[in-house]
Amino acid sequence: MKLITWFLRLLYPPKCVFCGKLLNEEETDLCAVCRRELPRCKNSFKRGECYQECFSVYYYEKQVAESVRRFKFCGQSQFADAYGRLMAMLILEKEIDFDLLTWVPLSKRRERDRGYCQTKLIAKSIASELGIETIPLLIKTKDNDAQATLKKFSQRKDNVVGAYRAIHNELFAGKRILLIDDVVTSGATLSECSRTLKNVGAKSITCVTLAATRD
């Protein structure tokens, strides 16, 4: 271990991004117990329209759900690095072919209140791991209710209709897009983003998230 790395670990002991346990020198991002026991998503999801598939690393349960909550609402923006590494591994494992990497954006107000756009941070972490660039292809034009407050799929779908606008259209005509989000539940948000991209020329959209709720 390099001296600077050792010193930083001494000052800021790394913890498991999911359970908070201190990590030993052989562990990265998550502890051996979480790596072994957290429920992995083995199959892709197709819960919405306009995108081909959605791949997720974990189910949105217990430690994963609590970790995402702290990431989004408690200022733990550093979790994006670990999430991105896990999602990059999934992208390589599934051999997902794509031309451009982008993310589901927040509204300006929500990003200002939160201090960061969590999906953009994750996308940048993934890009760093894969040695590529991210490109903003969507902006959110509608400051709608949070999807988590709505229970029915029809409500979630109606809530995001017209909420996004594509930008840099000339960059992705005929391109395969990899769309990044933190959690997929009904698939309504990913569907609306995918519909927006396809309407202005994207060839296909594949989605990757850290977590997914069970059917």
Image (cartoon, rainbow, N blue to C red):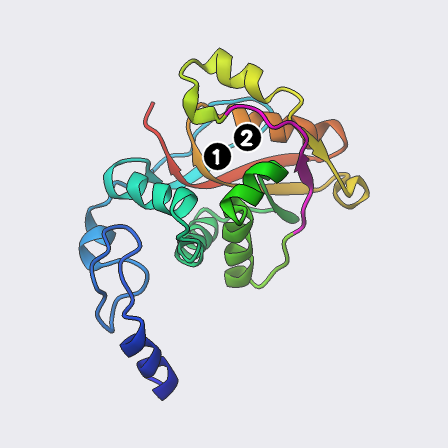
Secondary structure of the residue carrying numbered label 2: helix
Q: Which residue is drawn at 40% across and 16% down?
A: 151
Secondary structure of the residue carrying numbered label 1: strand
| Location of the C terminus (image quadrant) | top left
The CA span between labels 1 and 2 is 9 Å
Q: Residues within 10 Å of mark 1 (few under 14, many from 20)?
A: many
Task: Work out whether residue 113 or residue 151 is closer to the camera in this orientation and state it.
Answer: 113
Sequence order check: which comes first, mark 1 or mark 2?
1
Q: Which residue is drawn at 25% across and 40% down?
A: 39
Tag 2 residue: 190
Q: Main secondary structure of the magenta part?
A: loop
Magenta segment: does it hold 121? no
Task: Work out whether residue 26 or residue 55 is closer to the camera in this orientation and state it.
Answer: 26
Tag nearer the camera, 1 or 2 = 2
Tag 1 residue: 54
Task: Work out whether residue 52 or residue 198 is closer to the camera in this orientation and state it.
Answer: 198
Q: Please tell me in which quadrant of the rendered image residue 159 appears.
A: top right
- Residue 200 image offset from top left, x and y in percent: 76, 31
Q: How crowded is mark 2: few (under 14 residues within 10 Å), some or many (20 or more)?
A: many
- Residue 179 image offset from top left, x and y in percent: 57, 40
In the image, which residues are magenta?
Answer: 135-145
